[in-house]
Amino acid sequence: MIEAITGIKDSEQEYFINMGPQHPSTHGVLRLVVNLEGEIVKSLVPHCGYIHRGIEKMCEKDTYQQVIHLTDRLDYLSAHINNEAVCLLVENALEVEVSDRIKYIRTIMAELNRIASHQLWWAAFGMDMGALTTFFYGLRDREYILNIFEQTTGGRLLQSYNRPGGLMNDIHPDFVKKIKEFIVHFRKKLPEYDELLTGNVIFHNRTRNIGTLTRENAINYGVTGPSGRASNFACDVRKKYPYSAYDKVDFKEILFTEGDSLARYQVRVAEMWESMKILEQLVDGIPEGPFMMKMKPVIKLPVGEYYQRVEAARGEFGVYVISTGEKNPYRVKFRSPGLANLSTLNHLSPNVKIADLVAIMGSLDLVIPDIDR
Amino acid sequence: MTNEQLKETIEKKFDKATFDEFKGMLNVTVKPEDIHQLLDYLKNENGLKFDFLFSLTGVDWSDSIGIIYHLESVELKHVIAVKCKPESRENPIIPSVTDLWAGAEMHEDEAYDLFGINFTNHPNLRRLMMDEHWNGHPMRKDYVDKINIIDLG
């Protein structure tokens, strides 16, 4: 086609461009070297490491209490869930059974965190597609959750509220009231999201059949979380290996079969409804009990290897710790959902337009600090 | 399958493998010459079907540097950890598993970058986190970093 117009051979039309590390649609510092032919993507190579802080190396010098604060900085949008993973690992290793109150509060916080993360993703995804209004809607509703976080934990984005053996402090007296207010508010606002984007024809045309990932490939690439469930891969750790209070609540694992960008979008929107259902079931029945169990001031894990899996907002988050019985871990590995999801990008992108690449990236919901660690 | 059954099944085929169990997780340790065959067997054998590689971790055990693969079967719902310990610490060589799990590619890049493990048959082995001209492999225990901010304190 281009050959007919320009007289230059197709094979010589190929060129490379750098997308990022400052490109707005990468939502951070990810650099993609994209091989293009006209507007069509032929292949791409992701380059990571622009925000590599060596968190795993730092953890080797830190105590287990200090590790908590570093996990916040991985996937900062599911900071609470990352904290929880380390705490659960330490508690399982020391065989500490935490009170029901702690389990309930952790689960409530995790679900609030998941909703907040999906809200921000929804806001930014709409913006990637050129719909600026979504950004204001999403951030407006997210503010409610951040205020709840701030009241109880002191932190809005990074809470560091979990401690090995419990929580930093008890919940604020208004905690339950505020959550109920939020649910009432958001149950009214979430249908607005559907009106604005879910039913939008332009949006459908931009996302349907774009970046289709089959179930087989989702498993092969290790794509988890909403992106995996959009391909009918039942990978929800909350269902597979229930932790905290997830065995006490009734919720549905959202599965779609299409595997395209639209399905990934629909999974996340449906998950916001499910998270609200979980909140409603827990918020009234927070049992009495201590918010912190008795722990030794210096935590030393018995010699051995530990692995803890949790469901973060972007997929399966895993912590692997090798302990030699010292007060700091010998080796810490964070299994970040982002890196596995990013690895599919080269598989999904060939022969799509560069604007569709933005849609695919947005629907995979990458958070770069989570990938670079 | 229970860990006992898993152990028996694998032992029949790989008599050189060593086993240990900790906190409900079965660990299998093999040498690099067997690793690819073992993982292929774990993935494709009917009763095992470990098709989901959920973690690939480089580890410096101080006497050797190697890899831990965490595998899960989506259908049969059992998990296993496979360890590979090459003889040489200076230049550990392990066959790549990108032909079995496409998702392993970037994890292996990371292990090469941070631990200096060389993967054979890897399509494009490169440094993932560090600059391509970086000297050494930072996650190794004997790596010396002159401006380590943690040590300064």
Image: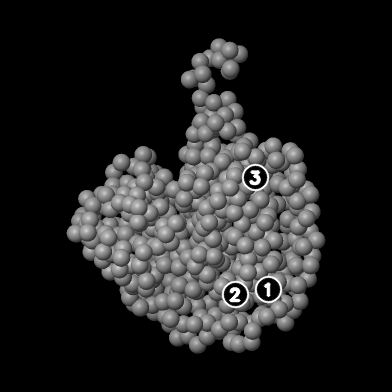
Query: Of helix, strand and loop, which one carries label 3?
Result: helix
Residues at discs 1 and 2 in contact (Cβ within 8 Å): yes
Q: Residue at x 51, y 27 (%)?
A: A15
Label 2 chain ID: A
The image quarter in which residue B69 lies: bottom left
- Where does the image place residue A142, in percent across and percent down from the top left? 72, 61
Please state which amino acid type lies under the numbered disc 1.
Answer: Gln
Between discs 2 and 3, the one toward the N terminus: 2
- Which residue is drawn at the image coordinates 47% and 50% (left, top)? A219
Q: Dividing the picture into quarters, in which one does residue A323 lie?
A: bottom left
Is A337 placed above or below A181 here? Answer: above
Q: Label 2 belongs to which residue?
A: A248
In the displayed structure, does residue B47 sit left or right of residue A129? left
The residue furthest front is B46
Image location of residue A369, percent across then percent down: 53, 55
The residue pinned by badge 3 equals A262
Q: Which residue is tagged 1? A: A281
What's the residue type where badge 2 is placed? Answer: Lys
Residue B73: which quarter of the image? bottom left
Q: How far apart are marks 3 and 1 (CA)?
A: 29 Å
Q: Which element type, helix, strand or loop, lies under badge 1? A: helix
